[in-house]
Image (cartoon, rainbow, N blue to C red):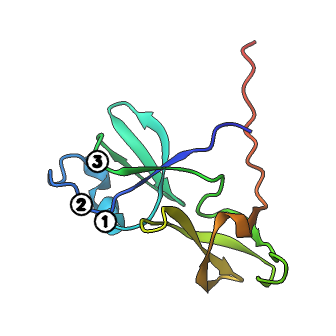
């Protein structure tokens, strides 16, 4: 499997107004930032860095944010909660939120089960991804 993606956390609104946001994405960014959400970094779009959060995407110029290494899970992924020797009740669900815990320096995963929000968060080691994340590299020929 390839490299795990990197993520960004914007816990504070950058001080330079909205000039750092692509004009078409200002409303989206205002709804998402500041927060503890982890935004997946996508390939750059020219001068702009592209971030996604589930189905939502936005473009920003380079700006101050906390970079976080991914753990191989993303918003929207179908997962199975592991039993952990009876500590958890196993179930299949989806990741609805990924949030950064600054105090413990870890990602917290919030889930849905049967389209209902699960009230607690889970750590990476409690989850098994059911998505095929293998990316096929195109042949040069």
Q: Secondary structure at mark 3?
A: loop
Position of the N terminus by quadrant: top right
Nearer to the camera, 141 or 136: 136
Quadrant of the image occupied by residue 85 = bottom right
Residue visible at 28% across and 45% down?
A: 63
Residue to which mark 3 is pinned:
64
Tell me, for residue 13, which label it has, or none.
2
Position of residue 139 measured from the top left corner of the image (x, y, whole percent): 75, 20
* Category of crowding for the residue at label 3, using alpha-carbon neighbours closer than 10 angstroms: few (below 14), some (14–19), many (at least 20): some
Tag in front: 3 or 1:
3
* Residue 61 placement, left or right of 19: right
* Residue 133 placement, left or right of 122: right
The answer to which of marks 3 and 1 sits earlier in the sequence is 1
The answer to which of marks 2 and 3 sits earlier in the sequence is 2
**48 over 95 or under it: above or below:** above
Q: Are marks 1 and 2 in contact (CB under 8 Å)?
A: yes
The answer to which of marks 1 and 2 sits earlier in the sequence is 2
Q: Secondary structure at mark 2?
A: loop
Residue visible at 32% across and 32% down?
A: 47
**44 over 28 or under it: above or below:** above
Tell me, for residue 8, which label it has, or none.
none
Mark 2 to mark 3: distance in Å?
A: 9 Å
Residue visible at 42% across and 44% down?
A: 50
Q: Residue furthest front?
A: 104
* Residue 8 placement, left or right of 130: left
Residue to which mark 1 is pinned:
34
Nearer to the camera, 70 or 45: 70
**58 over 93 or under it: above or below:** above
* Category of crowding for the residue at label 1, using alpha-carbon neighbours closer than 10 angstroms: few (below 14), some (14–19), many (at least 20): some
């Amino acid at each position: 499997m390839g490299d795990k993606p990197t993520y960004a956390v914007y816990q504070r609104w950058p001080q330079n107004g909205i000039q750092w946001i692509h004009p078409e994405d200002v409303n989206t960014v205002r709804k998402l930032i500041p927060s503890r959400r982890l935004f997946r970094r996508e390939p750059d779009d020219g001068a702009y860095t592209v971030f996604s959060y589930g189905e939502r995407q936005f473009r920003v110029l380079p700006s101050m944010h906390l970079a976080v290494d991914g753990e191989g899970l993303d918003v929207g992924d179908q997962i199975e909660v592991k039993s952990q020797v009876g500590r958890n009740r196993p179930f299949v669900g989806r990741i609805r939120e990924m949030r950064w815990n600054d105090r413990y320096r870890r990602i917290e995963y919030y889930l849905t089960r049967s389209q209902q929000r699960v009230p607690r968060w889970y750590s990476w080691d409690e989850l098994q991804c059911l998505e095929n994340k293998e990316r096929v590299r195109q042949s040069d020929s």
